[in-house]
Image (spheres, grey):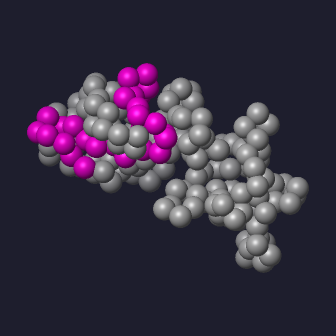
Amino acid sequence: MSEHIHIGKLAATHGVQGELVLKHVLGKKTNFKNASVIFIEKIRGEHLPYFHERSIIKNDAETIIKLEGINTREAARLLLQKKVWLAKADFDGLVSKSAPVNLIGFSVFNNDESLGLVESVIEQPQQVLLQLTMQGKEALIPINESTLLKIDRKKKEVYVSLPDGLLEIYLE
């Protein structure tokens, strides 16, 4: 599992001094003051470090953030729509315990059969998808009120009951 965790993206510029709107999935109002550094994926697979200068909380999912060295709207514009990552230690200190992204690293069980470890979380309006690797292939496990049985946070386990045939598409 990666030492960096994907938490969102830079969605918009704000003001004229290089501030950016960071849309994140941490599940609570976050000012990033306790994050030593955030990582921005300018090129796929490369996480470049940027230091937090200041921030203003907008809501549970958005923070206006000023990064060291980004001092103009034009410089900020170059970072728009880029993915943002946190080091695992910073992520653990900032994420809400109930945020779906906090399930990364949990074991997933379908009717008591182990499917694998959650590698990433994709949040959609109607459900959450847990991404894991099954027999060398990426699998997306839907988590919604009809599939989720329980989450055991102490044991780091997610229990689901998936519809017949869903797993077969990943195992063929």
In magenta segment, residue 32? yes
Main SS of the magenta segment? loop
Q: Is residue 87 in view?
A: no
* 123 lies left or right of 113: left
Give me the residue at 76% from left, 55% from top. Answer: 149
Quarter of the figure with the N terminus: top right
Asked if residue 87 is positioned above or below residue 25 in the image, the reply reads above
Residue at the front extreme? 145
* 19 lies left or right of 37: left
Q: Position of residue 130 (x, y in %)?
A: 64, 56
Residue at the right extreme? 112
Asked if residue 47 is positioned above or below residue 43 in the image, the reply reads above
Residue at the left extreme? 16
* 139 lies left or right of 135: left
Q: How many marks?
A: 0
Depth check, front residue: 48 or 129 = 129
Quarter location, residue 31:
top left
Q: Position of residue 98 (x, y in %)?
A: 59, 40
Asked if residue 38 is positioned above or below residue 82 in the image, the reply reads above
Depth check, front residue: 149 or 20 = 149
Q: Tell me where the magenta segment starts and ends, as one range.
A: 12-39
Depth check, front residue: 97 or 131 = 97
In magenta segment, residue 33? yes
Q: Position of residue 20 (x, y in %)?
A: 25, 41
* 118 lies left or right of 97: right
Give me the residue at 72% from left, 37% from top. Answer: 153
Q: Position of residue 151 (x, y in %)?
A: 73, 46
